[in-house]
Amino acid sequence: MKVLDLYGREKSVNLKRYLIDWEASSCSKFQSSIKNFLYPYWKAHVVTEEFRIPSSKLRCDIINWTKKIVVEGQSSIHGKYVEHFHGSRTGYLASWKRDAAKEEWVNKIGFTFVEIYEEDIKNLSRKFFIDKIGIDLI
């Protein structure tokens, strides 16, 4: 499949390497909960997990290529400086820049960017996506 890289150049990518395994664990319990929620809606769609954006080290948590939706799970540490994860204030700033670059790439390829926060998990529903994000999961 042809996909734009971070710099707008077209690259060939083998999506098979990234196809979601709905039954496997994800990189976190939080991401697994999002994946488990999405499964009944997206099980017949082309969905990838931990997709690496071409020409970068950036990864997208879950991408529905059929509906053109990128879902990013934002844990409770997102938006906070945590020395253990960021190393320094400079590392924290770099994480914000990476997030911005990822969202810019999603917009460049014409997909919808969805962020789900930990506090959203208990409210996840088809209605939540329609009301909060303006997209239908089906």
Image (tube, rainbow, N blue to C red):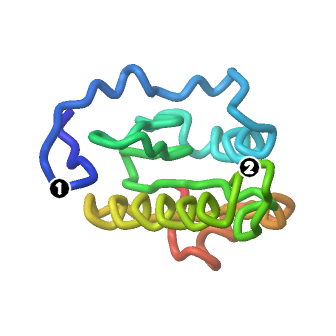
Q: Residue at x 33, y 67 (%)?
A: 107
Q: Residue at x 69, y 22 (%)?
A: 23
Image quarter for residue 115? bottom right
Residue 53: x, y in percent?
36, 43
The residue that disc 1 covers is 8
Q: Residues within 10 Å of mark 2 (few under 14, many from 20)?
A: few
- From the viewer's perspective, tell me whether residue 123 is left or right of residue 50: right
Of residue 41 and residue 36, the one placed in the foreground of this image is: 36
Name the residue located 48 percent from the left edge and 58 percent from the top edge. 98
Q: Position of residue 124 (x, y in %)?
A: 75, 61
Q: Circle 1 sits in a helix, a strand or a loop, which is it?
A: loop
Inspect the image, locate mark 1, and give the three-letter code of the amino acid beneath it: Gly
Quadrant in which the N terminus appears: top left
Real-space Cα separation, disc 2 to disc 1, in angstroms: 30 Å
Task: Describe residue 79's horizontal placement relative to residue 99 as left or right.
Answer: right
Q: Is residue 28 left or right of residue 115?
A: right
* Image: 125 above or below 61: below
Taking 49 as reference, is 4 above or below it?
below
Q: Nearer the viewer, residue 126 or 107?
A: 107
Say which residue appears at 71% left-offset and 43% top-offset. 31
Helix or strand or loop: what does disc 2 sit on? helix
Instruction: Place residue 45 in its image quadrant.
Output: top left
Residue 75 at x, y percent in the picture:
76, 56
- The mark nearer the N terminus, 2 or 1, is 1
Amino acid identity at mark 2:
Phe
Task: Find disc 2 in the rendering and name its residue.
Answer: 85
